[in-house]
Image (cartoon, coloured by chain):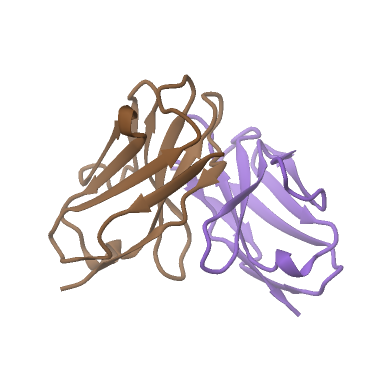
Chain colours: A purple, B brown
Amino acid sequence: DIPMTQSPSSLSASVGDRVTITCRASQSINSYLNWYQQRSGKAPKLLIYAASTLQSGVPSRFSGSGFGTDFTLTISSLQPEDFATYYCQQSFSTPPYTFGQGTKLEIK
Amino acid sequence: QVTLKESGPALVKPTQTLTLTCTFSGFSLSTYGMRVSWIRQPPGKALEWLARIDWDDDKFYSASLRTRLTISKDTSKNQVVLTMTNVDPMDTATYFCARIPTADDSWFDYWGQGTLVTVSS
């Protein structure tokens, strides 16, 4: 398995803020890194795949970057609907796939 | 459009076998590159990948659960079935099925709504 570590575990921010969430892999995973948003009681939603490609229909305020072991998800200007939990997931090589422990984004 | 929906028992007793069905539409699991996975989430905890089945019937399992899981597909019914033997209260979770749309990478682009399974006597 490739453990994934997200930071911070939780984050308080205000509408309009720029926020960054970090995900670190225990070994190089090239660009095999995906990001999901999960609102309370709902299924996860794919935001970014292959480290930096925006999924169709996802607002452009979301962006992803990184390669190797260190990756970031950035929300350029927080909107009320962005308060949720965010997960990274590595898809390097064959399974098993692993997720980060999640980052809960809360309203300040 | 692509949809997936999980079904199965809401409550199972310890040591029993859990059978979950993912019924999907909008794609075919006989199409090259298509794959379906099961992922679970214990209450208040993170996501955990469980198993994957591919268009060519290749199968992959979580190392820690490999001996207890079986994944299968019925292409004619557009269904993927996951069985888990000898369940324990630690298996209490919401179980999701999700689609992987490409053979070249493994991101989950469509998810079912999830089904909550409680393991309790």
Q: B59 left or right of A3? A: left
What residue is shown at x 56% (from left), y 30% (from top)?
B105
Q: Quadrant of the N terminus of chain B?
A: top right
* Residue for point 36% across, 45% down: B22
- Asked if residue A87 can be seen in this view, the reply is yes
Query: A96 and B1: which one is in front?
Result: B1
Which percent across, then down, holds residue B69? 24, 44
- Residue B89's x, y, as percent? 24, 68
Can you name the residue that lies furthest to the left here? B15
Q: Single out the residue that lies furthest toward the bottom.
A: A108
Is A106 displayed left or right of B92 in the figure?
A: right
- The quarter in which the C terminus of chain B is drawn is bottom left
Q: How many marks?
A: 0
Provide residue A14's location: percent of width, then percent of height: 81, 74
Task: Tell me if residue A94 can be seen.
Answer: no
Which quadrant holds residue A21?
A: bottom right
Looking at the image, is A103 positioned above or below residue A96?
Answer: below
Q: Nearer the viewer, residue A24 or A17?
A: A17
Work out whether residue B115 or residue A31 is closer to the camera in this orientation and state it: B115
Q: Is residue A74 above or below residue A79?
A: above
Residue drawn at point x = 85 percent, y = 62 percent: A77
Residue in the picture at 28% in, 55% down = B8
Work out whether residue A59 or residue A88 is closer to the camera in this orientation and state it. A59
Q: Is residue A62 left or right of residue B16?
A: right
